[in-house]
Amino acid sequence: MITATVFNHAGGAGKTSLTRDVGYQLSQAGHHVLLIDLDPQANLTSWLGVRKVDLAQTVFDVAVEGSSLPTPVEVHGMHLIPSKVDLARAEARIMGLPGAHSSLHVALQEVTDRYDVVLIDSPPSLGQLAILGAAAADSLIVPIPTRAKGLDAMPGLQEATTLYRRVRPHLRVALYVPTMYDARRSHDREVLEDLRSHLSPLGEPVPERAAVWLDSSLAGEPVGVYAPGSPVHQDVLRMTAEVARALGVRA
Ligand SMILES: Nc1ncnc2c1ncn2[C@@H]1O[C@H](COP(=O)(O)OP(=O)(O)O)[C@@H](O)[C@H]1O
Ligand SMILES: [Mg+2]
């Protein structure tokens, strides 16, 4: 079982989109995939069409009580531990609770024979839930927009990964993924060059194409279901191949 956390403390980086669609394509390739939504905004959950979530279905008890993983929701051939806004209450509860940050890692050890790939969608913060996710992972996948805000996030990213290695000494960034790339904008090309000279390994940029990403999310379907064969689906397949290679799984 390979566990990767999709991390960037900045919002709007493409974390949730990557988690949903790379997860879906890996499940289509025959892997048993578990997705975990750690963001109280619950975008991953709703963008997979899952609603009416009970707090007991989230990682709340895992984090606060050290419980086993709850029964996942089955969706589009994957398993999902969903989220809801109340999960935010876990932030205050696990702060200063000894061992709480490794509780998701511990709970995942009980399901290693059930899944091939676990992808964890991190919240847009450097808070307790983000630590919970990083401490559960072997690798981080880090999407970064090819915009000034992508560059602005870089010092925080380096700092966070250094800190997370205190709880997970072998944690590595398996892949940085440039996102929201518009090749017509000189700004984006410059930022991409900057990312290339500072970050390794860096994947190919994912083009900015808002409509299908937005519409598939509203429909609660991965791009591979909502718009198979579309240019965005081609982007997703390319991104999946890169992520799979970086994680050492078949795509
Ligand atoms: N390649 C893309 N081009 C344009 N819009 C995108 C792309 N990928 C994702 N989006 C949209 O950008 C927004 C932010 O993406 P999201 O995956 O929620 O990022 P994060 O989880 O890091 O906050 C969402 O509305 C999503 O639909
Ligand atoms: Mg998100």
Image (tube, grey):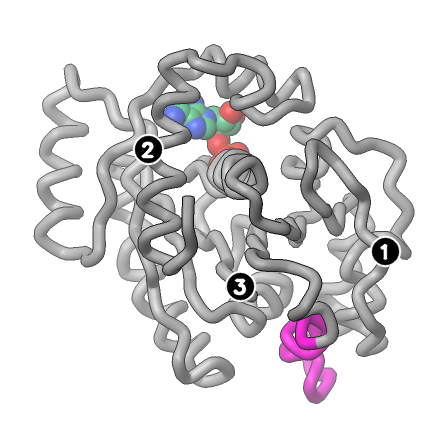
Residue with the mark numbered 1: 71
Residue drawn at 43 percent across, 14 percent down: 229
SS under mark 3:
strand
**Would you say 206 lies left or right of 212 here?**
left
Question: Which of the marked residues, 3 or 2, is nearer the chain's N terminus?
Answer: 3
Contact flag, marks 3 and 2 (Cβ < 8 Å): no
Q: Quadrant of residue 85?
A: top right
Does 217 appear above or below 139? above
Question: Which of the marked residues, 3 or 1, is nearer the chain's N terminus?
Answer: 3
Give the CA distance from mark 3 to mark 1.
18 Å
Where, quadrant-wise, is the N terminus in this rendering? bottom right
Residue with the mark numbered 3: 3
Residue drawn at 72 percent across, 47 percent down: 79
Question: Which of the marked residues, 1 or 2, is nearer the chain's N terminus?
Answer: 1
Q: Amino acid at mark 3?
A: Thr
Residue 52, given in percent of the width and then of the height, sits at: 89, 35
Residue with the mark numbered 2: 238
Q: What segment carries the magenta color?
A: 96-109
